[in-house]
Amino acid sequence: MKKLILVIFILLISITSYSQTTITFDTPQWELKIIGTEPFWDMELDNNDAEFKLFDNETIKFNKVKQIFVVGMQTEFITTFSLSSKKNFGYLTVKRCDTPCNDGMSENNYAYEIIFILNGKEAYYGVGNMIIDN
């Protein structure tokens, strides 16, 4: 638990060093695709639901997604989502990168850094990009 609090604290402290660029989660038909390494995981999130997949484990589906606004910060810069289902819950913090982020394993660039906390017990770090469906 102490490590989880430390990770969140460091993430929130570091946001002051990044520029504020535009991101919106109220655009119709958006989707955020996220990947993480160490361990390998991925998630797809939109304003209706989310799916979390940990390598070699079953998929956890969240049927409720609610945006939580960070007090004193612009939502274009950082925002958090509360995710829930009958058996699981999670919090997903999305922070816009000043310069493109990477996953540490490829040369792919990503616009967002993500911290995902599952059931209040495990925290996962990842990166992601917004996909706009037309």
Image (cartoon, rainbow, N blue to C red):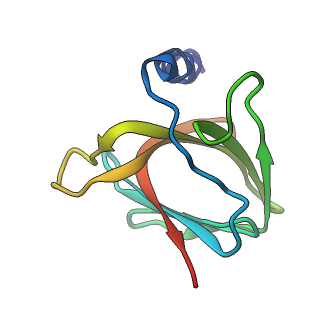
Q: Nearer the viewer, residue 61 or 81?
A: 81
Residue 50 placement: quadrant: bottom right
Give me the residue at 74% from left, 21% from top.
Answer: 72
Give me the residue at 64% from left, 53% from top.
Answer: 24
Residue 123 image point, x, y percent: 53, 37
Residue 84 image point, x, y percent: 78, 56
One can see residue 73 in this view? yes
* 115 lies left or right of 26: left
Vertical order, 130 against 118 (above or below): below
Residue 99 placement: quadrant: top left
Give me the residue at 59% from left, 18% from top.
Answer: 5
Q: Nearer the viewer, residue 21 or 61?
A: 21
One can see residue 52 in this view? no
Residue 82 image point, x, y percent: 76, 47
Residue 78 placement: quadrant: top right
Q: Nearer the viewer, residue 58 or 29?
A: 29
Vertical order, 64 against 117 (above or below): below
Vertical order, 5 against 54 (above or below): above
* 61 lies left or right of 7: right
The C terminus lies in quadrant = bottom right
Give me the residue at 68% from left, 65% from top.
Answer: 27
Vertical order, 29 against 45 (above or below): below
Q: Nearer the viewer, residue 70 or 63?
A: 70
* 119 lies left or right of 93: right
